[in-house]
Image (cartoon, grey):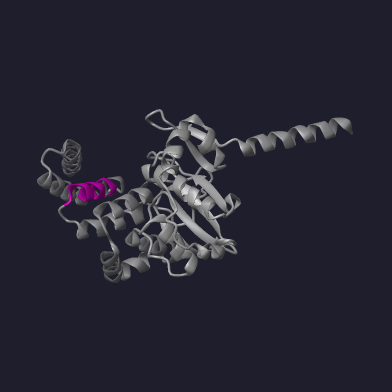
Amino acid sequence: MKRHFLIALILLCSNKILAQTPLTYFNSEGEKHLAGEFDLNILRTDTTFQKWYEQSEKLFQLSGKNTDWKKSLENTEVEIFIGTWCGDSKRWVPQFVKLWNELGLSEDQLKFTALYDGEEQYKQGPNGEEKGMLIHRVPTFIFKENDQEYSRIVEFPVNDLETDLAQIALGYASEPNYRAATYLLELFDSEPLDSIYRNVQTHFNEVYQRVGKEKELNTLGYLFETSGRLPQALLTYEINSVIFPYSPRVLNSYAEALTKNGQKDRAIEVFKRVVALEPTLESAIAKLKELEGEVNVNEN
């Protein structure tokens, strides 16, 4: 009996230690980062993260304006997806926490999840924590009440943190950044691809009205590509190539995805456009020669 009790106690303690120990990894540049859910205090105490956390925290100061609106946030939980490798995360997460604390709100209302960088698990969590959350930029702050999302801040505030948070609390939040990417994420999660293609012109028009810079959809396409959603990546890149037809970067991403999908002839066409726009882009030149050689061999 005592032996069984001792084993149970050891297992309980082990589980507690594991729960308190954040998952860390080293990226391709040898930098240490967090992955998965973690306690905020790791950013405050671990020397890897402590310096940038404290520096960013000092940048925020309350405006001194009326903050009675904070009462509306007392039952709100905020899920915060962060990349400890991401400059925007390093800047805005410490400032958000400081704002939250200075409003007298509890840190227990905040939940933190770190996502990977790199090609294999780009902006993904070790246990798929980001799935179904429409995460395409970090940091993303998701505001929930009774487990239902009612607002979010994506990557950086539309106005400033205090104004954005006040607007959320008062019920008239600014539209989050990257509206085109969000539109496509929601579309791909709610409708099958064949249906989307049947109405592709309508969807293109919606994206065109929402899109900002070329990087918005290029990053989204890369996210799909590295998370095993190549068909979605291809459509995203294709839409982006129509909106930004003279961008070597956009066209190169599209051509790479076409190559990965085995569409060599189409990839050759797009790589030719890349080289015409950027004659010194060696990677595109090399890929074009490789593909043309493969096609010629098959034809002979």
Secondary structure of the magenta portion, mostly? helix
- For the point 51% across and 38% down, the residue is 43
Q: Residue 258: where, in percent of width, then height?
A: 27, 49
Q: Residue 175: where, in percent of width, then height?
A: 37, 65
Looking at the image, which residue sits at the far top? 30
Left or right relative to 64: residue 20 = right
Q: Residue 123: where, in percent of width, then height?
A: 42, 46
Left or right relative to 190: residue 197 = left
Q: Residue 170: where, in percent of width, then height?
A: 48, 68
Quarter holding the C terminus is: top left
Residue 148 in sight in this render: no
Q: Toward the viewer: 234 or 54?
A: 54
Looking at the image, which residue sits at the far front? 64
- Residue 88 lies, with reference to residue 10, above or below; the image says below
Left or right relative to 277: residue 105 = right
Q: Toward the viewer: 111 or 226?
A: 111
Q: Toward the viewer: 160 or 179?
A: 160
Quarter holding the N terminus is: top right
Q: Is residue 151 found inside the magenta-colored segment of the image?
A: no
Residue 278 in sight in this render: yes
- For the point 25% across and 57% down, the residue is 240
Looking at the image, which residue sits at the far right? 1
- For the point 79% across and 36% down, the residue is 8
The mark total stands at: 0
What is the magenta range? 247-257
- Residue 85 lies, with reference to residue 71, above or below; the image says above
Q: Toward the viewer: 237 or 105?
A: 105
